[in-house]
Amino acid sequence: MKDKMIKNAAGRLIPEKINGEPIVPFMGIGKYKPQGRKFGPLISSVTDFPSDGDKTVPSLKEALIKAGLRDGITISTHHHFRNGDLVANMIFDIAHELGIKNLRWFPSASFPCHAHLIPYLEDGTIHHIEGSMNGPLGRFASEGKMKGVGVLRSHGGRYQAIQDGEVKIDITVIAAPTADAFGNATGDRGATACGLLGFALADSQFAEKVIVVTDNLVPFPCYPWQIQGNNVDYVVEMEKIGIPEQIVSGTTQITKSPDRLLIAELTAKFCETVGIIKDGFSFQAGAGGTALSIGIFFKQIMQEKNIKARYIRAGSNKYAVQMLEEGLTDFILDGQTFDLEGVRSMRENEGHINTSPFTSYNYHGKGNFASMTDVVILGATEVDLNFNGNVVTHSDGYLLHGIGGWQNCLFSKCTILPIPLFRDRIPVIVDEVTTLCGPGELIDVIVTERGIAINPLRKDLLKKVKGSGLHIKTIQELKEEAERICGKPQKPEFADNIIAAIKWVDGTVIDVVRQVK
Amino acid sequence: MKDKMIKNAAGRLIPEKINGEPIVPFMGIGKYKPQGRKFGPLISSVTDFPSDGDKTVPSLKEALIKAGLRDGITISTHHHFRNGDLVANMIFDIAHELGIKNLRWFPSASFPCHAHLIPYLEDGTIHHIEGSMNGPLGRFASEGKMKGVGVLRSHGGRYQAIQDGEVKIDITVIAAPTADAFGNATGDRGATACGLLGFALADSQFAEKVIVVTDNLVPFPCYPWQIQGNNVDYVVEMEKIGIPEQIVSGTTQITKSPDRLLIAELTAKFCETVGIIKDGFSFQAGAGGTALSIGIFFKQIMQEKNIKARYIRAGSNKYAVQMLEEGLTDFILDGQTFDLEGVRSMRENEGHINTSPFTSYNYHGKGNFASMTDVVILGATEVDLNFNGNVVTHSDGYLLHGIGGWQNCLFSKCTILPIPLFRDRIPVIVDEVTTLCGPGELIDVIVTERGIAINPLRKDLLKKVKGSGLHIKTIQELKEEAERICGKPQKPEFADNIIAAIKWVDGTVIDVVRQVK
């Protein structure tokens, strides 16, 4: 029987249930108020743990069996190893070998390296994935081949879902570049150092069983203890938990495309014009060539004005580290490191701070860092005339990206999307986004190589750019300009079958993704 | 109607209820297995907090009212300011002014400075205190003047009680030497720096409302964030939260008493003889002259042997800091700083680590640090022929001390009590301890100026001291020796009225304290 469909506050048709569980439809920004209490994991007793603190077991297989690996449970992993992760594949190799079925995999994100798991999605070892599906797994889902419906959450939404008991994790496996036998673990050192382990924090706090795997076991105490051994059940030492060359992915070079450079420069100029770049300000820019270039332009402006940022929110890389080490910012508040300089800096610089989705993004906390940040610069696959943004599906309708911290960052004081007017001759500004990931009322500015559109809700910004010489257009004008050049793009065709749900930061469902025809 | 009395596994008569709530009697070490789930505080929403992160309110009074100050609730505070705390008194001044009644005060400990609160205990503003009562408040309770029954817990037991939902905190007020407007707070800097805020960690995580008060408000982010702003509701800036000269209390000089020095030397010699002092070992010694002196003797032995400790568990002071800075230990795992050198070192030395009762002591966790420590050196007001220890009542029956981390530390690999055979001509070794705080099976060695008694359960230690020349006696012999000199001490006389309950580390009741006649 098909689930009944309902229209949420964004006007999107969504089913009443996802994977058989009732959902809460998106109610508008800040409208849904959570009830009840945070999830409480079972109370432990130290009498069930070795008094000498040695929790090592000989193999991941043994640890998983001890932790109660069985049909239908939820297993979580983190993605700080990005495309170099070796551990998630091992977990499901073991599950498959043991004939376990119907697992829910709850990674903080998945990457092309996890295409290894497609046979397990086919044979029912894994029922479905809740988490970003970057690349092949997203394509697999978009083709309607996953048994369950994927659920995509932002980094903050993932913390919220775990904290609120919306997703109960039976076993988490935390791959740690350095750990001790008690389970204290850190990401900032060791041969497979990935910087930090913040994406695994919620898992360590709320999962029923916590397994730490490491390829660098050190004597107690491992410090810093980004993951606390007091939350850990088992520790497994193994040869290699990640491929160092693949851990650091994402673009690490500033863009060479003249159009992208122009967009970056315009974005920085806009920020300067409206007075965002001032002493003690804060900003966040993602990875990728354009974002990196914006950082360079920011730096120039700051040096000219002789001002200093209070903090850079990051995804850190060598450019942010340079700014920290040159005294252009007091702090980097880092959620994940994108290159080895980020890892080194986190280890060495007191001002390079390890954060987590709890501090940065959790919408069901007593505030978070995202809304305090002066300006955030983000990407999008599509933006529509209402400034709504899409980051998960491509123009061909395939689900190929995760949400990351994107939704959470929208709450900054000024959200700017620097985007090209078209990609591969397909306009990026559309009538209506294929998939709604972020409501337009939170998206303030669109910067393109042919002009800047400011959300009409931001009258303050519109006033500030008057007479500035910046090329201000309406989003309608930008869209028409793109269509004059490229023609009106064809819409992808979808089947009825829902292959993924997009959660908003508060756990409500803002949209769904359908199978590509 | 009087509560029914029951005999617990230690043979102590305890009531079925304390303050009207049913209790679990002590069942033996490691026998009580907790059921159920950790306490979940109410889920918050960032929509109820200022998006710019500024949670400041003009006064503590306003913050308390906003936080729901009302009759009968539980208010908690921490004791890192020790006898220099100004904040707890302010809270109850405000409550009194507002006519609030029947509050439960749940400090991590109280000190003589809190004698200010006696009128509020008399007039019913405060119903009773759960937490250590050092000095005047303990005497007040022992005189039968407190309306409710005091409940004493160890540091670890306090974390356990909060985590398990045994004590639900309505409002916690966290005095912080440095904080930002978001509520991030640290104890390691500022004019009233006290080192760390670990005793307030559980309160910040589990209390319904969290107020941070500070006399050093810094721009966001305050780092380190020993207390995380994401758990904080309100921030109050005030002139002065503590008296710096009083914050650092406890003896900071090694003892000059020849007897105490001898005990210290014998303790170190014992540890050397049985092979505890070896490369990579770990130890914990409390504050106080004898304990400090033992550290000095340990240091000499380590230097002679050219060995290094892996960690010192502390209560830190200048002697431990010297050992860290001279390379005699890799780490200080610190739970509270006892002098300004400890505070400085925590701020400056990477190896001086801020711990909490969660990591160090929580018995309802997945292990803790206490049981991993090679040797711990503790005090006691009384020890009996079964090696049972008392730390809370004096020979006159008055409740004048808290438990601190004492019960938790008993789980170390070797627990040594260096004690004088008598104090003020009153023998310390007795037939049966007045108040049972720690069962004898966890207490391994008693070191006195006239000989060392080893718990017969520790056959391994008895074997190791054979032929060592150490003056080994039975505890019976030591007791008789003291009584030959001082005579048999008179037992204090008690009324029936129970004035305090002593909790064991697992939340069960191990003993009660009665009113002194």
Image (tube, coloured by chain):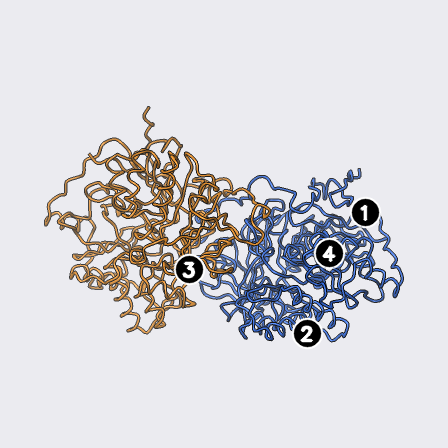
Chain colours: A orange, B blue
| Residue that label 4 marks | B455
Q: Which amino acid, by three-letter code, is at mark 1? A: Asn
The reply to whether dot 2 and dot 1 touch (C-beta < 8 Å) is: no
Percent across and percent down for residue B279 are: 56, 67
| Residue that label 1 marks | B497
Mark pair 2, 1: CA separation: 40 Å
Chain under callout 4: B
Query: Mark 2 or mark 4: which is in front?
Result: 4
Counting residues from the start of the chain, the first of labels 2 and 1 encountered is 2
Mark pair 3, 1: CA separation: 53 Å
Q: Which amino acid, by three-letter code, is at mark 2? A: Gln
Query: Mark 3 or mark 4: which is in front?
Result: 4
Q: Camera-side residue: A126 or A32?
A: A126
The reply to whether dot 4 and dot 1 touch (C-beta < 8 Å) is: no
Task: Please tell me whether mark 1 sits on a helix, a strand or a loop.
Answer: strand
Circles 3 and 4 on the same subunit: no
Circles 2 and 3 on the same subunit: no
| Residue that label 2 marks | B253
Q: Camera-side residue: A314 or A415?
A: A314
Chain under callout 3: A
Mark 1 Cα shell of 10 Å, populated few (<14), some (14-19), many (≥20): some
Mark pair 3, 4: CA separation: 47 Å
Q: Quadrant of the C terminus of chain A?
A: top left
Counting residues from the start of the chain, the first of labels 2 and 4 encountered is 2
Marking on residue A354: 3
